[in-house]
Image (cartoon, rainbow, N blue to C red):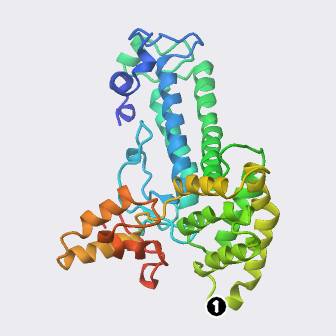
Amino acid sequence: LPASRNDYKLVQTLADYTIRRHYPEIGANLSNDSIAADACGEDKYAMLLRKITRQTALMIARWQAYGFCHGVMNTDNMSVLGLTIDYGPFAFLDAYEPGFICNHSDTSGRYAFDEQPRVALWNLMRLANPLAVLINGGGAATKESVEGGKREELKPETVKAITDILNQFGVQYRQEYVQIMRRKLGLFATEESEDLLDVVQPFLDLLEHAKTDYTFAMRALCDAPFIVYGSPPNSSEKQLEVLVDSLAERSLTFSCAADSSGWKAQAIEYFQKKYLPRLSREMGADGGHALASEIAARMKAVNPKYVLRNWVAQDIIEQAEKGDERAVDNALDLLTKFAFEDRLPDYLASAEKYAGPVPKWGEGLQCSCSS
């Protein structure tokens, strides 16, 4: 807003405040002079944009890995700290549908789930625009241009600095996303360059085809370490069938077992040729039931059993409206204390249904900005 009014003095004031208040490490060894630079020749405003870009990339990677749809990624709903803010018509995925639109008002799909990384980068470009007058790769804007509200043609050094910073968004996003997905699939100790293309993406493709419950599917993978080691003995084949059957049962595509037979065959082939061999390499040849249990527990710690789905929120609202004074408090306990737990305390026993199949009335539930 200040930049649109050519008030670059206020832009500088806001940038300086952000550095002092939230990124003091930037200014720790620099003066308040806008031309101050670090040892690499990068001024503090370039460093600020770099920090914000990285924090945004990490946040978006976590959204995508956990199936979170924001719904209203306007620039004013983005945080310079990389925090998720403005919880309006947000949602967690039920079925894995990359193009899912959680905001009923978003008729064009601008903020669809799979568009979120692109929109985040676009928003960063908008932020870079007012900061550009302050950034000069070691020679920032003159005091006169800032105080006088003049926006002169950007110097080549400034353009290069901003371009280099924004080009890092995709790299940082991908690195964080792959690391999170590795952990969710039980790949904690080893990294293989093709994990995303060979292991992660084919699994997501299967889920997309079947419209399988995303949170459930990731949680179901926590049984995979026991399949690798055949624990109990000679049970691997049967366990794999059970796992694949459970994924098919949580599909919104298949109406009967016959519909899913071809998909199940593809899923079993994926597990046998892609995922389980990769998990086996991760676990090594000397493991056993104890190691399988350890890895399964670590997987459960990063794959929640319960998330705040739209239909869950609606169910809780209806309970509260009917006079259940504990409904909201119990939901808060469930999602902040027991989201990753297999067993719930007795007072939350009825909440087990929130890990179950999505009811018909709750499938694809959308909210709007006024919900």
Q: Secondary structure at mark 1?
A: loop
The quadrant in which the N terminus is found is top left
Identify whether 340 is placed above or below 348: above
- Taking the spot 41% from the left edge, 43% from the top edge, the residue there is 83
The quadrant in which the C terminus is found is bottom left
- Does residue 152 appear in this view? no
Q: Nearer the viewer, residue 66 or 150?
A: 66
The percent position of residue 92, horizontal first and vertical second, equals 47, 63
- Taking the spot 31% from the left edge, 60% from the top edge, the residue there is 333
Q: Quadrant of residue 324?
A: bottom left
The percent position of residue 255, horizontal first and vertical second, equals 61, 89
- Does residue 55 appear in this view? yes
Residue located farthest toward the right when viewing the structure as drawn: 273
Q: Quadrant of residue 165?
A: top right
Q: Amino acid at mark 1?
A: Cys
Which residue position holds label 1?
256
Side of 236 where 109 appears, left or right: left
- Taking the spot 49% from the left edge, 78% from the top edge, the residue there is 357
Q: Nearer the viewer, residue 135 or 315?
A: 315
